[in-house]
Image (spheres, helix red, strand yellow):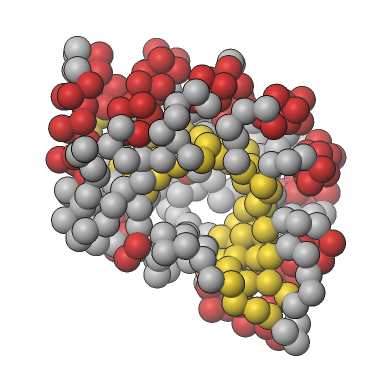
Amino acid sequence: MNQLLDKYGRKITYLRLAVTDRCNLRCQYCMPAHGINIVDRKELLTYKEMYRITRVLSELGVDKVRLTGGEPFVRKDFVNFLESLSFNKNLKEINITTNGALISNHIASLEKMKINAVNLSIDSLDKQRFFEITRRDVFPKVMQTYQDLIKSNLTLKLNVVIQSGINTDEIIDFIELTKGDDVSVRFIEEMPFNGKGQREVKEVWNYNKILEKIKAHYQEVEYLTAKKSSTSKNFKVKDYKGSFGIIPAFTRTICSDCNRIRITATGLFKNCLFDDGVFNIKDFIRKGASDDDLKQLFIATVQQKPINGFVAEANRKSNKVSESMSTIGG
């Protein structure tokens, strides 16, 4: 069977698929207050097209899919699409990233499907600060989602974007959630995908600085061995039930083992978060491409995958990284 191997010998097994560019929040690190210019619905991949893309990729060895947005639960019939994906026997993991404001009514349904994990994005445990970050008053809903997911059989991870001058004083508060709850908190370095580009900060809160703050507070922090292609470096406080990880997304020290590709809601294929897209698969499909055509295109495109995110950024046609993460696919 043909497999997706890049020229550095990395096997691609993980697809991040955005189902929409729309979102019900307006997080500061993701988009401007007025939002972004969302595309016309006919420019989005249909669920049928997304299912086909996923099936073809799974026949090439992709066995893990993460559904993102925007906010995936904003799109009508998203849960039905998840159910259809569950019938793909080649997929070992189907995961979701969500902001938590719309998912609660669907948790029972998700537990019956082949959904492995939910990543809940939450950047503050303070109601007022949460509002200032997201520009929306949905904190009670998100915290209820947290409680509902803790009680469910789904693996729960919290995604916390660490923003200099905004929420760095809450790092320990998030760690304390792992004391009694079986949850993994993942601190993510802030990136320039906010619709405007890199913002100026007084302190750079990178992987090292985050870890230093945690180790200064706790006497015993244990390192956890992660899978080779893990995006996070993982730890736990001794005797705590859950764990925490740090994702060096901006300093990009995790690129050497990268096994991921991205497809945006409009069908743009991305070998790397930091590239500006390789080709549009939607256009290729709508011109009548066969499954074999798609496979050959995927195999050839993955061969172009850069060694790391710095090379990908340097090779961009546009000099500045200024997209919204909602456009790229969270």
Q: Quadrant of residue 252?
A: bottom left
Q: Is residue 316 left or right of residue 100?
A: left
Q: Position of residue 169 (x, y in %)?
A: 74, 69
Q: Position of residue 86 (x, y in %)?
A: 53, 26
From the viewer's side, name the closer residue of 141 and 321: 141
Residue name at image x 69 percent, y 42 percent: 154
- Image position of 287 with respect to 143: above or below: above
- Image position of 241 with respect to 88: above or below: below
Residue name at image x 60 percent, y 35 percent: 115
Q: Is residue 68 left or right of residue 28?
A: left
Q: Position of residue 73 (x, y in %)?
A: 62, 27
Residue name at image x 45 percent, y 49 percent: 193
Residue name at image x 41 percent, y 60 percent: 229
- Image position of 32 with respect to 9: above or below: above
Q: Is residue 79 visible?
A: yes
Query: Looking at the rendering, in which quadrant would you find the N terminus?
Result: top left
Q: Quadrant of residue 25?
A: top right
From the viewer's side, name the closer residue of 14 and 130: 14
